[in-house]
Image (cartoon, helix red, strand yellow):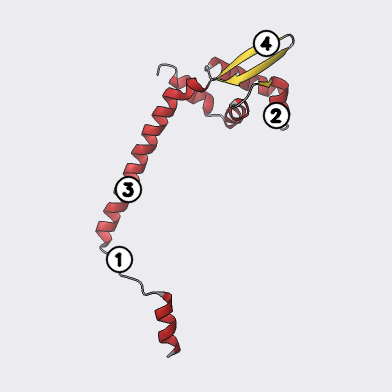
């Protein structure tokens, strides 16, 4: 997990996450990635691709003058495990907080069904 800080830094950017989403299932040319992000300049897309490549999250293949990018899914493995542990810990703390709050408040009174309330009002 030595490269985890670089991976976390790379996926911290919403633009880089969007690029990862685009190249997750198939290889795309840099121009196609840019076309999918019309609000970003080609130079900015190129910088984001370089950062993802340096973090080991995408691999680049050159074909004459074009560059094609594909996600390296295995690179997210250790990070995914870390995120899962963090998520489980957060859920456990939330559950504990809810249980403590329920114990502090005591049992909730039972609510009557709406049908009973409507019948009583009508009689």
Residue 41 visible? The answer is: no
For the point 44% across and 28% down, the residue is: 80
Lower position in the chain sequence, tag 4 or tag 2: 2
Res 88 quadrant in image: top left
Provide the residue designation for mark 4.
Answer: 62
The nearer-to-camera label among 4 and 3 is 4
Provide the residue designation for mark 3.
Answer: 95
Q: Secondary structure at mark 2?
A: loop
Give the Cα distance between marks 1 and 3.
Answer: 18 Å
Residue 26 visible? The answer is: yes
Q: Circles 2 and 3: CB distance less than 8 Å?
A: no
Residue 96 point in image, percent of width and height: 29, 47
From this viewpoint, which residue is outermost toward the bottom? 123
Residue 42 point in image, percent of width and height: 72, 23
Provide the residue designation for mark 1.
Answer: 108
Res 120 quadrant in image: bottom left
The nearer-to-camera label among 1 and 2 is 1
Q: Secondary structure at mark 1?
A: loop
Give the Cα distance between marks 4 and 3.
Answer: 50 Å
Q: Secondary structure at mark 3?
A: helix
Above or below residue 118? Residue 67 is above
Q: Residues within 10 Å of mark 3 (few under 14, many from 20)?
A: few
In the image, taking residue 99 as reference, residue 30 lies left or right, namely right
The nearer-to-camera label among 4 and 2 is 4
Provide the residue designation for mark 2.
Answer: 40
Res 62 quadrant in image: top right
């Amino acid at each position: 997990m030595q490269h985890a800080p670089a991976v976390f830094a790379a996926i911290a950017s919403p633009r880089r996450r969007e690029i990862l989403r685009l190249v997750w299932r198939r290889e795309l040319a840099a121009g196609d990635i840019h076309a999918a992000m019309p609000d970003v300049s080609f130079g900015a897309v190129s910088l984001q691709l370089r950062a993802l490549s340096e973090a080991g999250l995408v691999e680049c293949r050159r074909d004459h003058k074009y560059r094609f990018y594909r996600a390296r899914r295995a690179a997210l493995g250790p990070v995914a495990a870390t995120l899962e542990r963090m998520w489980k810990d957060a859920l456990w703390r939330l559950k504990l907080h809810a249980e403590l709050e329920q114990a502090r408040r005591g049992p909730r009174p039972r609510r009557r069904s709406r049908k009973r309330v409507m019948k009583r009002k009508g009689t």
